[in-house]
Each structure stands twice: as C-alpha cells, then as structure tokens.
Amino acid sequence: MDPKTILAPLLEPLSEGAPHALALGHAEALADAFDAHLEVIGIGCDRTQIGYYYAGATAVVQQETYNEAHAATEQIEASARAHLKASPLRWSVESAVGQMGVLAGLITSRARFADLVVMPAPYSSGKGPEYEIALEAALFDSHAPVMVVPEAAAAPVRPRRAVLAWNQSPEALAAIRRAMPLLAGSDLVNIAIIDPPRHGPERSDPGGALSQMLTRHGLRCEISVLSRTMPKVSDVLSRHVADFGAEMLVMGAYGHSRFREAILGGATRDVLEEPPVPVFMAR
C-alpha cells in the first residue's frame, strides 16, 4: 500500500541547506511521488530540569524556558508555512510546546496514524537528544516506518538500486515489507547478508526465500553474502552500499534493546551516526 500520510517533525526553524530542511525536502518529494498528504509538526522543546534549581527559582525558570520554547515553536511554524505556502502539495502545519519528558508522546500521537515519518539523522553533530527521542517514539511507540535522510545531496524518492540488510530477523522483514512501495520499479535490489549463521534456517541458501518473495512482486534481485572484514557491521554495510551504487538502504531497527545499543553500540545506532544514503527503517 502506497504511503498516503507522510509526517515530517521539525524541531528547529528551517534554514537553507540544514539537515532538517533536507529531510523536509525529501518528505515533499515523497508526498509528490505518492500523491500523499504532508503533515508537518513543529515542536519547541522546553528543556527545564526542575531538580537542579535552588528553592524558589523553579517557577521563574519554568516560565522563562517555556517562553523560549514557545517562541521557538512560533518560529518553526512560521518558517514551515512560508516554505510550503506556494507548494502544490496537500499539506498541513501544526505546532506544540513540550518538555523533553512529553516529547515522545507528542510524536507518538501524530506518527501512529502516519504511513511514513521522515527525519534527519539523529546522532550527527549538533543534534540534541530530542532527535533521538522523536525517532524512537516513531519506531517503538507508533510502529511507523521512518526514513532517515543524510546530510548530503538530495536522493531520488524511488531508488534505482537499493540494498536490503538481511539478517533473518523480524525487524528486517518488517522493514522490507514496509519499503515495498518505494522499491517498486527499481532496476536492481541487492540483499546483503553479513556472516550468515552456519546452522540457521537459511544455511544452504542465504536470502533465497526473501529473493523469491521479492521476485514474485516484480523486483529484480541479487544476493551478496559478505564477510565481516571490518570492526562494525555498519562499516561493512556502508562500504557495500557505496560499491553497489545504492540510493537507499533498508534495514530493521534496533534488533537489540535501546539500552544495550546506547551503551555498547549496535548496527542501527552506528548506521544512523553517518548514514551513507537515505535509510528506511521499521520494526
């Protein structure tokens, strides 16, 4: 099913060439390609930490930080409306102010009814924790797929070549199923498997069943079994994406717990620190 509602959260005012502006541009291109409605929500983050203020200062600090967040929200909404006012797309813009503790709830309430959420990479330099909170709220609480747009030149909405990171996990299969509308019409889809288990269910034909499923949907597929010759799985994937000339990477999100990935790292977090191309994620 083609996406018909595309959500683009904005956590700071638009500025030309900035990562969030590139992400919004990609969301616009997706909405145009799929004749979808583009929803933009601008959120001003109130970063008040009540426990760290001396007695009597809490109310004053809370009001001041709320005023700053409210002003930021108005700037975000105004910049989004100015950017979209001449657009032929069907679009809407709304805004909200929230403390960090309720940010996830704000994103969840909108993303749960969206077919796709489009965001900039959350772990790149200069990004606050609100970007990670928004991404995880969409994936875990809303169960919505997320397109993460890198800080690079604009990428095509319908990739001619795409890499599917396959490890036989439910998360990877969910991402591939949700990405099918974007993969339709591609020239070639590559199923990338890194060090497949010797005793797994696909030991004799890694990726064969998935390739068969995709072929029956009209996709042209090939399978690449890769050795983990680099310290991180993300490094192997990034190199393969570049070698293959892929324009999109599809992968399952957070196969391990978020706590484990935050402390020890993981493929999801590592890829999102420097995504080589737009990354389509779901779980």
Image (spheres, rainbow, N blue to C red):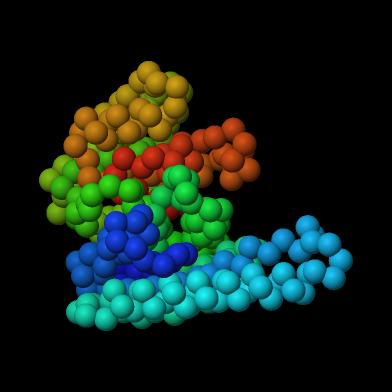
Above-or-below relation of 17 to 41: above
Q: Residue furthest right?
A: 55
Instruction: Decide which of 263, 19 is in the foreground and name it.
Output: 19
List x then y, in percent, for residue 61: 72, 69
Which residue is found at the position 85% from the left and 70% from the top?
A: 56
List x then y, in percent, for residue 246: 22, 40
With 282 as the anchor, is 130 left or right in this view?
Answer: right
Above-or-below relation of 231 to 108: above
Quadrant of the image containing the N terminus: bottom left
Which residue is found at the position 47% from the left and 78% from the top?
A: 74
How many marks overall? 0
List x then y, in percent, for residue 226: 32, 24
Which residue is found at the position 66% from the left and 73% from the top?
A: 64
With 30 as the anchor, is 133 left or right in this view?
Answer: right
**Quarter where residue 15 is shown:** bottom left
**Quarter where residue 62 is shown:** bottom right
Instruction: Decide which of 74, 235 is in the foreground and name it.
Output: 74
With 245 as the anchor, is 268 left or right in this view?
Answer: right
Is any part of residue 198 visible from this angle? yes
With 194 as the anchor, is 1 left or right in this view?
Answer: left
Is any part of residue 102 visible from this angle? no
Instruction: Decide which of 141, 78 is in the foreground and name it.
Output: 78
Which residue is found at the position 36% from the left and 55% from the top?
A: 19
List x then y, in percent, for residue 139: 49, 57
